[in-house]
Amino acid sequence: MTAGAERIWAAFATPAFRWLWLASIAINLTIWMQGVAAGWLMVSLTTSPLMVALIQTASALPSFIFALPSGVMADLLDRRRYLIAVIGFMICIAAVLCMLSASGGLGPWMLLFLTFCLGTGFALQGPAWYTAQTDAVTRLQLASAMALSSVSYSSARAIGPAMAGAVVSSFGVLAVFVCSAVLLGGALVVLFRWKNAPRNAHLPPEDLFSGMRSAVRYVRHSEIMKAQVLRTSMFVGVSSSLWALLPLIAELQLNSGARGYGLLLGSMGCGSVAGALILPRLRSWIEMNRMMAIAAMLYAASILVAAFVPNIVAVCSALFIGGAAWLAVGNTNMIALQSSVPAWIRARAVAVYMLVFQGAMAAGSAFWGVIATEIGMTNTLLSSALLMSIVLVVMYRVPARLGHESEATQSSDALHAGFVTEAVPSDASVAIQIVYQVAAEKRKEFLRQLYAIGKVRRRDGASFWRAYRDLEQENCYVERFIVESWDQYLRQRGRATVADLEAERQLWTLHSGPTPPAISHFVSEPCP
């Protein structure tokens, strides 16, 4: 076995990761099998392109709505108990699907509602499950765990649709719903047997809304996160046309039935698995942004083949390449994200990525469904393939990059520490003031560095930040920022990375006073 192959499978050396990985396959199989069954059942209930496309929207929309709260809860709650509750909820929904399908009471709108509920469970477990897998391994195994998580999802996408198509053709939709409930039960057994490590927290946890504000604040002031949001939303929104209209391609373009629909999805899934396995080697050969641009063009080509070629072998071959291209873009964006964020925000960063990804998928699917109703399936797919050129422009103008280790490693030190001689009220906001003396020839460099530090302060917890120049002292500059509480200030200090600390040290070298910058701490005082 080569060194590269050993690195790919390294995370399997950890038993906890192995079991969680197998359970993740069961959950992903459930989602893909249920998606195929629901999509095909909707085709039998109505021929409306919009209603068929809304199955994809019902599956993806919950991740847009619940992704951020689920990321916060993954950081705040005991992950094992939280995941047990969520998977239990999904089992209940699968049971309802079984009962209604068996009794013949499953109409189009009820199918959409229950698909939305199952998608809600999938959205709620996503960030917690992903971070549970990465927490189960060492830092050296982290890249392996991320790659294997992609393999898990892609394998389920390859196997699930084909299994569902075969089961629907042979035994009907009800059998797929029963299989989904059984698979979720297996995942629940793994969770009951899993023993997660206790958390060591020196500060009380944030509440849900404070945690959500922290996530939004981080995205707003992190250039890497903003770039990922833009790139992901553009690519997924445009490329969602193929996923949304795939049932109609199978039914109207290829006349291949449920088995053919499963083969189409399975082809994309197999392509994704192949892409996940060869992606590490491709990254060593091709620059990251160039590789994603090539992948986007290949995906556009697969859309065109699906739109115009009425041959299932040709379409499956094109979708195999499209699946690999889809995985290449998504996985590379995720690796760029994960390599750039520290541990305290990692689950929420994953949640934001899921929110953007699934939100773009939901909105894009509904949009392309409406367009297909007006101009037809073929013209809609052609339009989306042409719009991929805009995605290429965005990729060129907003390139992705891997984060340095110092950007994702929290520092154990701080240049400014707060010492108080009295208890600070929990509802009192805290203001921090730092006074610098700066020589005239260093002002421009100082201000550039200071404003970069200001982004870090706001990213990590400050609700307000300003830089001031003293009108009475020519060389005096004052930095002031406010956090909502003393605990939040301590969290802000603890969130600083090694790169942040080095940037602040560089700022302090531009201070020309005889003593270090003067630091003052203030607490808000209510009117008596």
Image (tube, grey):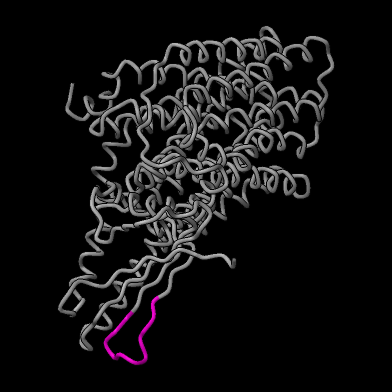
Tell me which corner region of the image, top left, top right, bottom left or bottom right, holds residue 145.
Answer: top left
Residue 259 appears left or right of 464:
right
Tell me which corner region of the image, top left, top right, bottom left or bottom right, holds residue 31.
Answer: top right
Furthest-front residue in this view: 528
Residue 308 seen anywhere in this rendered image of the structure: no
> Residue 91, percent across and down?
63, 16
Near-viewer residue (295 or 212): 212
Residue 499 seen anywhere in this rendered image of the structure: yes
Furthest-top residue in this view: 171
> Residue 232, percent across and down?
49, 49
Give the residue drawn at x 50%, y 19%: 159
Near-viewer residue (138 or 214): 214
Residue 473 is covered by the magenta coloring: yes
> Residue 166, percent across and down?
61, 13
Give the residue drawn at x 29%, y 34%: 143
Q: Is residue 100 above or below residue 460?
A: above
The image quadrant where one finds the C terminus is bottom right
Give the residue drawn at x 80%, y 36%: 48
- Counting the numbered discs, the total is 0
> Residue 167, percent across and down?
63, 11
The image quadrant where one finds the N terminus is top left
Q: Is residue 403 above or below residue 475?
A: above
Residue 124 is covered by the magenta coloring: no
Q: Is residue 454 above or below residue 301?
A: below
In this picture, which residue range is highlighted in magenta?
467-477
Tell me which corner region of the image, top left, top right, bottom left or bottom right, holds residue 181.
Answer: top right
Give the residue drawn at x 24%, y 44%: 285
